[in-house]
Amino acid sequence: MKILRGVCAILGVIGIAIVSLGHLSISKPQAALAQDAGIHKIKHVIIVMQENRSFDSYFGTYPGANGIPASACVPAPQGGCVRPYHDSNDRNAGGPHGEQNAIADINGGRMDGFIISAQRGRRGCRALNNPNCTNGSRVDAVGYHDQREIPNYWAYARNFVLQDRLFEPNASWSLPEHLFLVSEWSASCSQIGDPMSCVSALQNPDNPGDFRARRRAAAMQPGRPNYAWTDLTFLLHRAHVGWAYYVMGGFEPDCRNDAMQCAPRRQNVRTPGIWNPLPSFDTVKQDGEVGNVQDISNFFEALRNGTLPAVAWLAPANRYSEHPPALISAGQAYVTGVINAVMRSPDWRSTAIFLTWDDWGGFYDHVVPPRVDQNGYGLRVPGIVISPYARRGFIDHQTLSHDAYVKFIEDDFLSSARIDPRSDGRPDPRPDVRENQPILGDLRLDFNFAQPPRAPAILAGGIGPPYSR
């Protein structure tokens, strides 16, 4: 014991602190501890979620990133293979992007099923908005864009942080990804209001979409869709941390699961949807916070007034989402407008923006997703961190998923409390605590909290509300 006390005293003199990681004790420099504490300079976290792009489709040729290999060549059904190529088209078709499509694209780790999946997604699909269909007559799944089509996204990468190993939390389509984004799980609950009746559902969770089949089902199953398990807002509410989920009015694209055809469904704050799941969570209703789901115009007003809540999610309408066949240029203009507005606001000096895309959209990516548990990860997607404290021109090679956003929020505002059924006071049978996965990196690496806050980097081409529908 005397020896241990002596060691600790020596470590204290040289500026080393002892921290515990499970059963393993390691040393951590005081500078690193200061970086940990620096997270609290971030008073506002904004998550901007766009749609359906793989990392290689946007940043596969970005200098220094883990991009498209020179040897890459993807098999085609008619024989031979197609090398990834520069695609200058503003409108893409993409490919199918449900759970089975992800399995086919990954193809046992060969990462070569993209063209075959896209070709199959054209057959028998009369709807351009079905996640099991290819959204157009062209097959462009191995095409990629660069700074010629997405100059502002590349500018953000050059000036701030690009993450080249960020994976969607599970290999599936929009609704499961958005459920993970706010709750760390995608599930289906057999009993309305009973969290313990929920089981993992990576393809077919309760769908809030008001498609033709759902209208009939809703009449037979009042109370659905129902998300009974715990989401992040439950912890935020308990800790008196403000949040808002900002929704753009317009339309959302995806049909319900494997429907062969459907019309795009209208989206607004009053309509729970695949990009707007929080109104269907029991916790949001029980906490009286359905009103925290607001029109996106309120986001810009909050920026002007300096009243932005601590945590904000932004969901675009289809036209500005980059979800094929929406125009890339429209999505980039919307995102640029959002970021410009943040930079011009009094909250810029205390904000972190996490810009990402929900799933791979059927587009080629060469990196095999790591397997972390029974639910994920899915394919690699782009990720950019924008903040006055973000490192300049830094490429983050950590293994990340959208779970890292929840972890960052919990570390910043909740004293590292997790969505954990063993400790959060609201048990559910989720298979694990995603934020505690050993493979998951720490977003604090993307910041230098010792540097003075950086000046805004306003870019041309941004648009704000009112948005065309």
Image: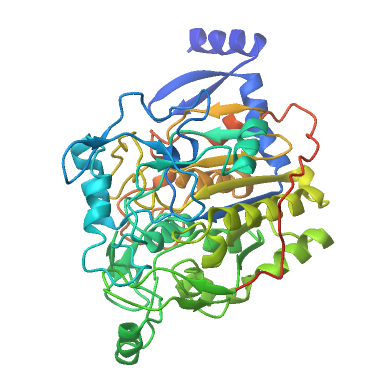
Question: Measured along the vertical axis of the image, is residue 264 above or below residue 347?
Answer: below
- The vertical placement of 353 against 301, above or below, is above
Position of 459 with respect to 88 (left or right) is right
Instruction: Place residue 269 in its image quadrant.
Output: bottom right
Q: Quadrant of the C terminus?
A: bottom right
Picture coordinates of residue 62 (x, y %)? Answer: 52, 30
Q: Horizontal placement of 94 versus 278: left or right?
A: left
Q: In this view of the protein, which residue sits in the foreground, 131 or 78? A: 78
Asked if one can make out residue 287 in the rendered structure from this viewpoint, the answer is no
- Mark count: 0
- The residue drawn where x is 56% and y is 74% is 250
Work out whether 4 lies above or below 242.
above
Q: Position of residue 461 (x, y in %)?
A: 71, 51
| Residue 33 can be seen in this image | yes
- Front residue of 12/249: it is 249
Q: Specify the color scheme.
A: rainbow
- The image quadrant that residue 253 belongs to is bottom left
Name the side, left or right, on which 372 lies relative to 464: left
Residue 196 locus on image (x, y percent) = 31, 67
Query: Considering depth in this image, is 326 or 415 the residue closer to the camera?
Result: 326
Q: Residue furthest bottom?
A: 219
Q: Where is residue 68 drawn, in percent x and y?
A: 39, 30
The vertical placement of 31 against 374, above or below, is: above
